[in-house]
Amino acid sequence: MITQPMALGSRLLLAVLVLLSGCQLESFAERQARQRAGYLGEAASSQEPLVWTSRRSPDADGAIASLLAAHLYGGQARISGEPTAQTQAILQRCEQSAPQRTSGLNGSTIGLVGANQGNGWDAAIAANHLVAVVDHRAPGTGNLSLPQAQRIDIRPWGATTTILEQQAQSLGVVLPKPLACAALGAIVTQTQGLQSASTTPQDRQSAARLARRAGIQQAQLLTSFDLQER
């Protein structure tokens, strides 16, 4: 007997629907929770709200890294003080919302990005509330004791945003275009157009991926973002 094409197509469609009915699609919040548990371990189960922040009035790298961390692992991105003019220009150029401003962080578990020293941190940050530190600078003097930190990720790269972009890559996370654009701006400005002595191959790889995602040509990098901190 010759099977009619329509009948065969219907059977295949039915088989696909049966297969999909047994699959649970993971929501964005569930994915964040899974990634947070993998990154922070036991600290991920804390009942306190998770806040990603940086030093007071952070540079573009610190402010935008807080947005990236919150996107990957959940929680809120907050900063103390006014965003720099350079940060505001990048966010406006990319149509990306800024981290929330906060006057205090009491009652929160804290993930620090773009900072690993006590100087310049929000005075409300208590060492026993720190659960993560992500930075591209080597530790220096004035370090806080970190009794509760579950993740300390310090790499000698040109930007903290590069570290988080590489994490997004390893997790298979496709960043929204506005966030990818802002992350590109953070890396480009932090490394002075990928020309500073601290620029690494990882910075260039991340910048290339983010540029493709944001739809910005390599030749446009230096004209898209103001490299001078104001």
Image (cartoon, rainbow, N blue to C red):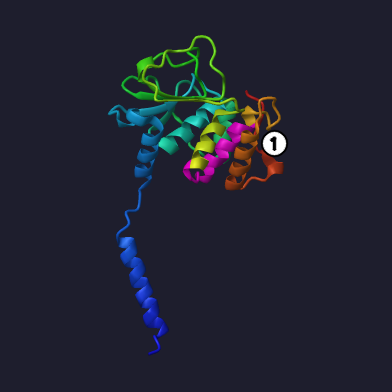
**What residue is shown with label 1?**
222
Quadrant where the C terminus sits is top right
Q: Is residue 180 magenta?
A: yes
The residue closer to the viewer here, 64 or 44, is: 44
Main secondary structure of the magenta stretch: helix
Q: Name the outermost residue toward the front.
A: 1
Q: Tell whether 32 sits left or right of 92.
A: left
The spot of residue 5 in percent (x, y) is 42, 83
Whole-percent x, y for residue 142 in the image:
50, 9
**58 shown above or below 72:** above
Stretch in magenta = 171-188
Label 1: how many residues lie within 10 Å, few (<14), some (14-19) or many (20+)? some
Residue at 68% x, 32% y is 194
Q: Is residue 106 left or right of residue 68?
A: left
Location of residue 23 (image quadrant): bottom left
The answer, for residue 95, to whether it is visible in the render is no
Question: Which amino acid is tagged 1?
Answer: Leu
Please say if 154 is above or below 188: above
